[in-house]
């Protein structure tokens, strides 16, 4: 169906999504995962004003057809945009560009350069360190076939001996094992990768959100099931821009701080 070229006001959104043409392309030979490329395309269109707050963006099926992507890939891109507060998704209605939040809360932007994912005086308790088959999401991220063996490290973050966080890391098969067990229980969450030489000149992408503790995580963190937790999802990219680690951590808000230094220079 041809794309409609006329402009729609936000009041017209309820009658259907904006059909502005999506000229941006997916490059399958690029090092970035397909879902991340789609996310960047949609984000750039929001930043350019092609999609305004309250606008309904193209649906999952249209994005699949337009870019030749799987449903899993499209949903992962939209899910990350939702976690970042860029869009709001409603069952049966579609995905809308999020409206700016009111208030004087902190603003997170591309200028975030310094982060800390652990409070002082900390350690780790290792729950498991093993090879597992890559899920479709991990396979897409690392550019491998589903069920390809990837390294999985599950740990509990400790502060003064008490559990404050539960983390799971998956490492791309491009990073060859074995890993030094002595590095699992000390230092930062990335220290186990440093002997491989992949942390230097790397970049990270973090997504913060709020989740509710399920029964298993609640037992580990000594909180009631359903308690609010801070979730940090991180992807580590090597110097060539290829994803080499996915990290998902859930932390107690009453025992954990996430510090951000926004070094972005403000324009006059």
Image (tube, rainbow, N blue to C red):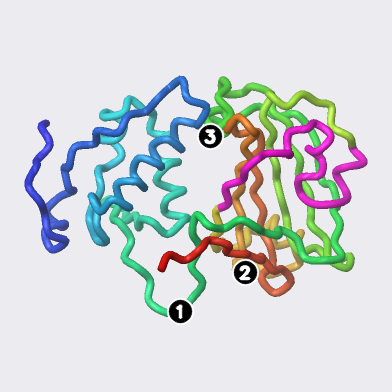
| Secondary structure state at the residue bearing disc 3 | helix
Observer-side mark, 3 or 2, equals 3
The residue sitting at 81% across, 44% down in the picture is: 191
Q: Quadrant of residue 63?
A: top left
Q: Where residue 239 sits in the image (x, y, percent)?
A: 64, 33
Residue labelled with disc 1: 104
For the record, the magenta segment spans: 181-206
The residue sitting at 79% across, 57% down in the picture is: 157
Residue labelled with disc 3: 137
Q: Quadrant of residue 260?
A: bottom right
Q: Do the residues bearing badges 3 and 2 touch, measured as CB atoms within 8 Å?
A: no
Q: Eyeballing the image, is 11 above or below 38?
A: below
Q: Where residue 28 sits in the image (x, y, percent)?
A: 43, 22
Q: Is residue 60 left or right of residue 254?
A: left
Q: Is residue 47 left or right of residue 189?
A: left
The circle drawn on residue 222 is none
Q: Earlier in the sequence, mark 3 or mark 1?
A: 1
The circle drawn on residue 227 is 2
């Amino acid at each position: 169906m041809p794309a409609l070229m006329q402009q729609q006001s936000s009041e017209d959104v309820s009658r259907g999504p904006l059909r502005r043409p999506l000229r941006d392309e997916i490059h399958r030979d690029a090092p970035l995962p397909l879902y991340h490329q789609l996310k960047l395309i949609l984000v750039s269109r929001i930043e350019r004003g092609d999609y305004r707050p309250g606008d309904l963006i193209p649906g999952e099926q249209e994005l699949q057809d337009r870019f030749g992507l799987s449903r899993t890939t499209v949903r992962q891109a939209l899910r990350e945009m939702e976690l970042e507060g860029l869009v709001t998704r409603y069952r049966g209605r579609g995905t809308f560009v999020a409206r700016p939040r009111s208030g004087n809360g902190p603003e997170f932007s591309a200028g975030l350069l310094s982060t800390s994912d652990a409070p002082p005086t900390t350690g780790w308790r290792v729950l498991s360190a093993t090879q597992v088959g890559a899920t479709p999401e991990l396979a897409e991220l690392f550019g491998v076939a589903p069920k390809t063996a990837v390294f999985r490290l599950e740990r509990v973050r400790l502060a003064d001996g008490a559990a404050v966080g539960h983390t799971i890391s998956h490492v791309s098969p491009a990073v060859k094992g074995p890993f030094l067990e002595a590095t699992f229980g000390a230092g930062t969450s990335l220290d186990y990768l440093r002997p491989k030489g992949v942390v230097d000149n790397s970049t990270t992408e973090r997504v913060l959100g709020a989740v509710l503790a399920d029964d298993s995580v609640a037992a580990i963190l000594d909180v009631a099931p359903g308690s609010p937790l801070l979730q940090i999802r991180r992807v580590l990219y090597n110097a060539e821009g290829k994803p080499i680690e996915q990290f998902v951590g859930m932390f107690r808000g009453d025992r954990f701080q996430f510090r951000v230094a926004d070094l972005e220079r403000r324009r006059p």
